[in-house]
Amino acid sequence: MKILVDNQLPLALARLLNAKGAECLHVLDVNLGKATDGEIWRYAAAHGMVLISKDDDFFHLSGQQRAGVQLVWVRLGNCRNAKLLAVFDALWPRIQERLDDGDRIVEVW
């Protein structure tokens, strides 16, 4: 599974998911740190990547376009990186299962 982590989430999330066996990049890894939502969406689609983001614009894009991009929509609000990483560490098996089952949008609360 290839994953792209959006800019408002930390690089540490991409590293955590890599440690769990996912092929994960942060937008900074692919020079998309200043890219528009559309550019990030198209990159994820072109590379067959799951997108992880807090940005609700991607939720709206996922409903409008059938580009084959699956979205992990982080709905935790503002929280410290330690909490975010702990949530993903605990929930990753379930998130991955839902993505493998073909869910287009997986919400993380």
Image (spheres, rainbow, N blue to C red):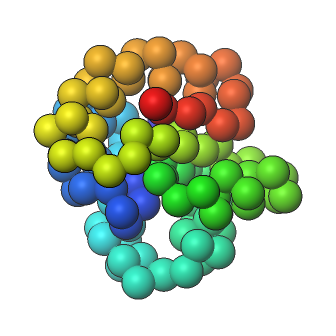
Q: Is residue 95 left or right of residue 13?
A: right
Question: Residue shown at 42%/60% (left/top)?
Answer: 6
- The front one of 33 and 54 is 54
**How many numbered discs, if any?**
0
Can residue 47 be spotted in the picture? Answer: no
Q: Position of residue 78 (x, y in %)?
A: 32, 50
Q: Residue at x 46, y 30 (%)?
A: 109
State the image coordinates of residue 96 (x, y, percent, origin top left): 48, 23
Q: Is residue 37 placed above or below 35 in the rendered structure?
A: above
Is residue 49 depicted above or below 30 in this figure? Answer: above
Taking depth in this image into account, of 46 and 94 the one nearest to the observer is 94
Image spot of residue 44 (x, y percent): 57, 59
Quarter holding residue 99: top right
Left or right: 108 in relation to 38: left
Q: Tell me, yes or no, if residue 101 can be seen here.
A: yes
In the image, 20: left or right of 53? left
The residue at the point 40 percent across, 40 percent down is 76
